[in-house]
Image (cartoon, rainbow, N blue to C red):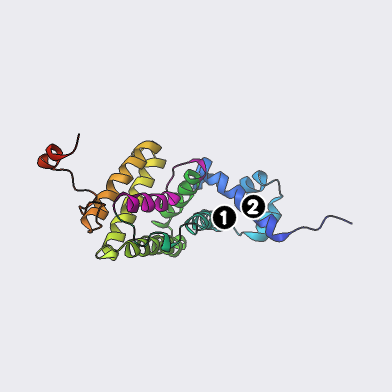
Amino acid sequence: MPARIDPARRRQQVVEAAFRLVVAEGIEGLTLRRVADASHLNIGSVRHYFDGHQDLLAAAAQEAGDRMGRRLARHPLEHLDGLDGEAAVDALQALVEEVLPVDEDRRGEAIVVVELIMASRTRPVFQAMAARMASDLSMVAHDALATLGVSDPRMRAAQLTATIGGLTLDAVTPHGALTVGQLRATLRAQLRMLLGSAGIEGDRGAPVDQPETRSDQCSSPR
């Protein structure tokens, strides 16, 4: 008997091929023929699951979002409750880095998402998905900041998601050409300012972004 074909596995094979092509060549490289070749299937098999390159890009972006979501799920909100100072910065940075291009896998995901967002500017078919992804990220940021006890978490979430978007774009394009080290250092500085201005207290009762005064430095034990 011929081997039984698992439709879900075959569809995933196609999605992963589309994902790799978007990372390597952008949306311009995403055609049914190229995806069929990359997934070692005939074009009819690809058409069985996807009508064209628009469906393929949406599926690749959904795959990126799903991967990010699984990593974010490893950071339950209760782990943020009661944190302050550098502990709050550490925890928030670990959470945010799950959606930033800090390694090869996450860089690929970020590229796919950026391609979808850029396509949504002129192609209405992608606009709802791009808006939903933005809303999901905003909700994650809002809930994390609210759990940390910041004032006005909605506004702070908007600031944080803008930071994430800017860092992502500057890391995966020549626009900023950020290294991973530069990305992490910039993110940490932004989180310290964000949490400090939002009133998250440090271990000694000072906002986390408040520098020591000259008198503090002089009175410090040697």
Query: Label 1, label 2: how many angstroms apart (C-alpha)?
Result: 8 Å
Q: Residue at x 53, y 54 (%)?
A: 67
Q: Which residues are magenta?
A: 85-105
Look at the image and tell me whether residue 177 can be seen: no
Amino acid at circle 1: Leu
Q: Residue 52's x, y, as percent?
A: 58, 56
Q: Residues within 10 Å of mark 1 (few under 14, many from 20)?
A: many
Q: Which quadrant holds the N terminus?
A: bottom right
Could you say which is closer to the camera, residue 118 or residue 142?
142
Tally the marks: 2
- Tell me the quarter of the picture where residue 11 sits: bottom right
Instruction: Return the residue at label 1.
Output: 56
Task: Relative to 52, say whether 218 is above or below.
Answer: above
Q: Residue 158's x, y, as percent?
A: 30, 60
- Tell me the quarter of the picture where residue 79 sits: bottom left
Instruction: Answer left or right for 167 relative to 25.
Output: left
Q: Residue at x 40, y 38 (%)?
A: 180
Q: Is residue 95 magenta?
A: yes
Could you say which is closer to the camera, residue 198 or residue 222?
222
Could you say which is closer to the camera, residue 100 or residue 208?
208
Q: Residue 103's x, y, as percent?
A: 48, 41
Q: Residue at x 36, y 42 (%)?
A: 184
Q: Which mark is residue 14?
A: 2
Instruction: Answer left or right for 9 relative to 152.
Output: right
Q: Which quadrant holds the C terminus?
A: top left
Q: Which mark is residue 208?
A: none
